């Protein structure tokens, strides 16, 4: 007998727990976001003027939009290994386990655009670059991890 009891003991139904938790977690979504393919295969971006000179690339495409919870999880980094000044912070977006959103479409380099920041309207002009989408086995929502460039303002 291990810490979980005899082999005949009932198993934990993770799928049922996830199903029960989804509406509870949804109550915490107080923002609205879009997941965007920025289509930046080519061209140059001017951070100061917030413009891109495109050379054959198409315009950004919104892949998904909906409710979310925004969670800033770390203090901003203020310097690189070369002591260059930066202002990058890790931000996690929690979104529903939406069947219309293929998780394979959420790839590194795509962007999150905050259309309604809820109680954090300052996030509506932030630049969020997706680094990963990782869930635990207790998935009652989807986590999208991003790096926020606090030095960039998007209009």
Image (cartoon, rainbow, N blue to C red):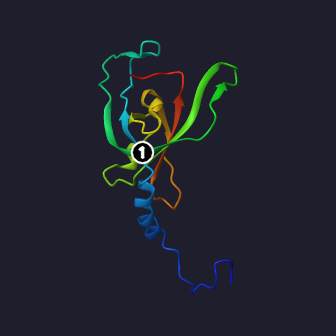
* Left or right: residue 84 compared with residue 66: right
Please tell me whether residue 44 is drawn above or below residue 75 in the rendered image.
above
Which quarter of the picture shows residue 124? top left
- The count of marks equals 1
Counting from the top left corner in percent of width and height, residue 66 is at 34, 44
Q: Which residue is mark 1?
A: 30
The answer to whether residue 53 is above or below residue 40 is: above
Give coordinates of residue 1: x percent, y percent: 68, 84
Residue at 44% across / 40% down in the picture?
Answer: 107
- Where residue 23 appears, as percent x and y from the top left, is 40, 60
Of residues 111 and 154, the one nearer the viewer is: 154
- Residue at 47%, 29% (x, y): give it: 122
In the image shown, does 48 or 53 lie closer to the viewer? 48
Tell me where residue 63 appears, x and y as whole percent: 32, 39
Q: Residue 150 lies in what quarter of the image? A: top right
Q: Along the line of sight, which residue is nearer the eye, 144 or 122?
A: 122
Q: Residue at x 46, y 32 (%)?
A: 123
Q: Would residue 56 appear left or right of 126 to someone viewing this image?
A: left
**Residue at x 46% of width, y 39% of height:** 119
Quarter of the rendering containing residue 89: top right
């Amino acid at each position: 007998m291990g810490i979980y009891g005899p082999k005949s003991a009932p198993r934990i139904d993770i799928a049922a727990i996830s199903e029960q938790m989804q509406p509870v977690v949804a109550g915490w979504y107080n923002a609205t976001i879009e997941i965007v393919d920025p289509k930046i295969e080519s061209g140059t971006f001017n951070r100061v003027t917030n413009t891109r000179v495109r050379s054959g690339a198409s315009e950004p495409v919104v892949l998904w939009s909906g409710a979310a919870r925004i969670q800033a999880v770390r203090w901003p980094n203020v310097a690189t290994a070369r002591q260059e000044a930066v202002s990058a912070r890790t931000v996690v977006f929690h979104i529903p386990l939406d069947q219309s959103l293929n998780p394979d479409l959420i790839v590194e380099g795509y962007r999150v655009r905050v259309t309604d920041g809820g109680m954090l309207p300052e996030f509506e002009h932030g630049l969020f670059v997706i680094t990963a989408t990782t869930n635990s086995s207790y998935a009652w929502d989807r986590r999208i991890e991003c790096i926020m460039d606090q030095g960039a303002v998007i209009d």
